[in-house]
Image: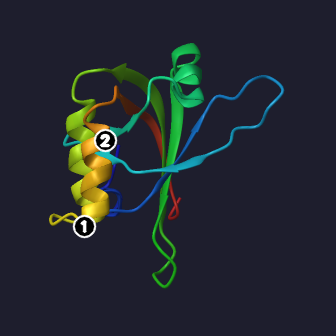
Amino acid sequence: MLTDVDRALLSRPLHAFVATVAKPDRLPAPRPVWFDLTAGGDIQLFSSPSTARVARLRAVPRATAVVAAPTGEPERWVAVEGDVTLHSEGALELAETLAHRYWGDELAPEHQAVLDEWRGLEWVRIVIHPTAVKRSAD
């Protein structure tokens, strides 16, 4: 489903804009998040279990993630739509992995303090299993 070009873009430390199914009287409101592309082509991210995003995903387990190349590069984007599963296992490990991916291997003291704080919190790992992929070349 994902092409090699898609995977190359999704393997970079960029933000994904994730949208969930909104309440009937609201429009979807995508939010920027850190994410990881799994070897199997799923998109995973982490969140606090008390967020509105997680509540919406419990009600309707579907989401879309859009990732675009940064300004200054040729236009390129990938939109992944799919079913979602929520997991308590692996969430903290994902948060730690993404902290190093986005902040670097040698964490600045302020980033290390945030990561240390995260270790005392509860997290949910959100996995988007693609059912449709659109891209800028489509």
Q: Position of residue 80 (x, y in %)?
A: 47, 44
Asked if one can make out residue 4 in the rendered structure from this viewpoint, the answer is no
Q: Is the residue 14 above or below the residue 47 in the image?
A: below
Residue name at image x 54 percent, y 28 percent: 51
Residue labelled with disc 1: 108
Residue farthest top in this picture = 59
Q: Quadrant of residue 56?
A: top right
Q: Is the residue 38 above or below the residue 135 in the image?
A: above
Tag shown at residue 117: 2
Residue name at image x 24 percent, y 40 percent: 94
Residue type at the position of mark 1: Ala
Tell me the CA gap for discs 2 and 1.
14 Å
Residue name at image x 45 percent, y 81 percent: 73
Q: Secondary structure at mark 2?
A: helix
Q: Earlier in the sequence, mark 2 or mark 1?
A: 1
Asked if one can make out residue 104 in the rendered structure from this viewpoint, the answer is yes
Residue type at the position of mark 2: Glu
Left or right: where 35 falls relative to 40: right
